[in-house]
Amino acid sequence: MRLLELLIGKRFPFPFVYNDEYWMVDLGRSVVDVRKYRLIYERLLAMGVRKENFLESPLADDEDILRAHTFKYIEKLKAGILTRAEIQALELPFSSELTRFALLHVGGTILACERALDCGLAFHLGGGFHHAFADHGEGFCAINDVSVAVEKLRADGLIRRAMIIDCDVHQGNGTAAMFAGREDVFTFSIHQMDIYPAEKPPSRLDVGLWMGDGDEAYLSAMRTHFPTLYESFRPDLVVYLAGADPLTGDKLGGLSLTLDGLAERDRIVIEGARRQKIPLAVVLAGGYGREIMDTVQVHLNTIKVAQKAGSPRLR
Ligand SMILES: [Zn+2]
């Protein structure tokens, strides 16, 4: 039995970060379907991941949130006194429950980044709220978990340079704006041009694609930049937003990538970082598949690619 447990544990030589509260928040009739978090968790258990492999996301501290956000915005968010326009920009029903949801995802991404430094790779079954700016939230994103995590790890002296690879179909506008002009944080975004956000503040490197471009254009662009970018920037940590919304049929995206194309995207990012022994934290970001299981499958495939690539420090 011990040998069996050891073997099963070895199949996932990296931790997952998750909190069962993720899927309990009530977002009304939003296109955001929080059941995906629970479904991925359940599938991983069914695949043999032990409960000990899951770490529970804690609530993020104010001190850490304020490393990336303005005091004024966070004060209003926590007091529940956002203006009607601010709530409209979020495109979600606002509640204290939503604020708690956002704080847990930030805590989860911080934990995944810290564990990535220890284990080589860590997976947050949440996070990727890249449309949140320092002073406001928008596009389903109240707090920018990845930006907060990068700032916290830098402040704690755990890393000096970070690379954020944003492969959600929507441009990472909040993250790009937060790190504009920064030498120590490289922001990369590959996205669809003709959809939200209308205004796209420049990332360090943006790749803009168009409706229907599909696997070939997408993967050719990824191969142009990876692994070269790892070699030239040499980050201490990579945070990968493995969005599921470039998938064909997504309700909010039109890039029309196939499941195989998305898995190849994951291999380019994950295996590239692994080969260079750069710690990697993966967060889920968006995904609005025609069927929820389409979205879940994309995320599970990313996990399988990571499983195959193994942990850089453990191999
Ligand atoms: Zn998205």
Image: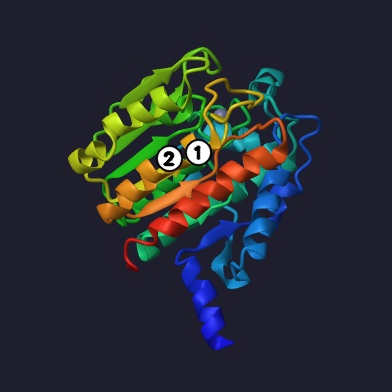
Q: Which residue is drawn at 40% across and 45% down?
A: 267
Would you identify the image quadrant in which residue 222 lies? top left
Who is closer to the viewer here, 14 or 111? 14
Q: How many marks?
A: 2
Above or below, comparing residue 81 to residue 9 in the picture = above
Could you say where residue 192 lies in the image, as x and y percent from the top left? 48, 19
Asked if disc 1 and disc 2 are in contact, CB closer than 8 Å, the reply is yes
Which residue is identified by label 2? 264
Above or below, comparing residue 141 to residue 101 in the picture = above
Left or right of 20? Residue 15 is left
Above or below, comparing residue 19 to residue 241 in the picture = below
Residue type of the residue flagged with mark 1: Asp
Q: Is residue 110 visible?
A: no
Residue type of the residue flagged with mark 2: Glu
Left or right of 274? Residue 133 is right
Crowd around label 2: few <14 · some 14–19 · many ≥20 (10 Å): some
Q: Which residue is drawn at 38% across and 52% down?
A: 280
Would you identify the image quadrant in which residue 264 lies? top left
Left or right of 191? Residue 275 is left
Which residue is identified by label 1? 260
Q: Quadrant where the N terminus lies?
A: bottom right
Could you say where residue 300 lies in the image, as x and y percent from the top left? 57, 49
